[in-house]
Image (cartoon, coloured by chain):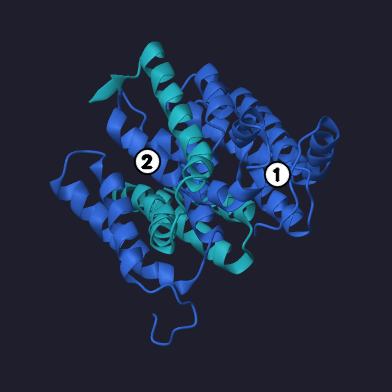
Chain colours: A blue, B cyan
Amino acid sequence: MNDRPGAQLDLAGILVGIRRMAPLSLFVVIFGLAFGVAALARGLSGFEAMLMSALVFAGASQFAALELWGPEIPLLPLIATTFAINARHLLMGAAIQPWLAHLPPAQRYGSLVVMSDSNWAMAVADRQRGETNVGMLVGGGIALWLTWLAGTLLGVIFGSGIAEPERFGLDVIMGCFLLAMLLGGRRDLSMLAPWGAAALAALAAMVWLPPHSHVIVGALAGGLVGLMVPARPTREATA
Amino acid sequence: MSLPATAAGALAAIFIMALVTYLTRAGGVFVMSRVPIGPRVERFINAMAGSVLVAVITPMAVQGDWGARLALVATLGMMLATQKALAAIAAGIVTAALWRLWL
């Protein structure tokens, strides 16, 4: 790990990163559109939806936040949900830390502003090939950010023309998006135990604990069960 | 403690979310440059990442109407069959819309 080449960041590398991410980021427009529609259906203004996409720039946590949006926005559940969903960034950042350590701090922490799943994955692949230019992380992130924002804008424009979003099934976008993200990520069967525990704990919290606490309770229960389940995918007798 | 969903309250909520999210983006690099993140912490975070989504989805399945429930089933089926998130989400929306059209 320590004999890896260094790292640098320049405009040319960023432009290459933007170009390489362009095909994939077209899909992001559609996800952004779905978020814009869902946000309006949930009572956010178009400006609020755009601002959230611009500043938070993390799809799953934005959809989950909509679920908490109401006449009042519960602060602690909002913070806990946002943190738990985006906690994977901690591991992603940790994985590329030895690489980014070669950059000056301002570039290092500036690059992380746009770190998202796909540009991170492509940057990790670059690094494994011995690439020293961090442009894929930053350029790819910029491409994703622009298309996420463009998609949200389209969704806000499109969504403002729909009077009864439930009639067209648009209120289920949130749930379906989050479920698709859940199943699209790491999908080994050892996750069934933590996920089952999370569902049961969330149900119990919905019955006995204050409103919105089910998210925190479920996330913690799942994390703790994950600690107890040995992480060996090929182990026999794992249901 | 909660924020009112007024313009100011919503703005505050969005800024707080943005801050928390940036802390997760920068936090891994910041912490790792001082203390290595061990396999136990990694397992906890990996299990928690999916579990929080499960915990958010669970009430929708329990409290939602049959349109919402069938939408989740359709998304699950399509996702397992094709691994394509967009197709899975579209299947969910169409299922909910059709169910409500006929009832």
Q: Residue lying furthest front in this view?
A: A3
| Residue at 79 percent of width and 51 percent of height | A131
Return the chain for callout 1.
Answer: A
Looking at the picture, tell me which residue is in the foreground, B10 or A167: B10
Q: Earlier in the sequence, mark 2 or mark 1?
A: 1
Give coordinates of residue A191: x percent, y percent: 42, 67
Label 1: few (<14), some (14–19) or many (≥20) C-alpha neighbours in 10 Å: some
Locate residue A3 relative to residue A90 in the image: left or right: right
Is B103 rendered above or below residue A37? below
- Nearer to us of marks 2 and 1 is 2
Label 2: state its secondary structure. Answer: helix
Give coordinates of residue A189: x percent, y percent: 45, 73
| Residue at 50 percent of width and 40 percent of height | B30
| Residue at 62 percent of width and 49 percent of height | A98
Q: Is residue A30 among the parts visible in the rendering?
A: yes
Is A191 rendered above or below residue A3? below
The reply to the same-chain question for discs 2 and 1 is yes
From the image, tell me which residue sits under label 2: A81
Kind of residue indicated by mark 1: Phe
Give coordinates of residue B11: x percent, y percent: 43, 17
Looking at the picture, tell me which residue is in the foreground, A211 or B37: B37
Kind of residue indicated by mark 2: Thr
* Residue A27 marker: 1
Q: Is residue B98 among the parts visible in the rendering?
A: no
Label 1: state its secondary structure. Answer: helix
Rounded to the nearest angstrom, the CA distance separating label 2 from label 1 is 25 Å
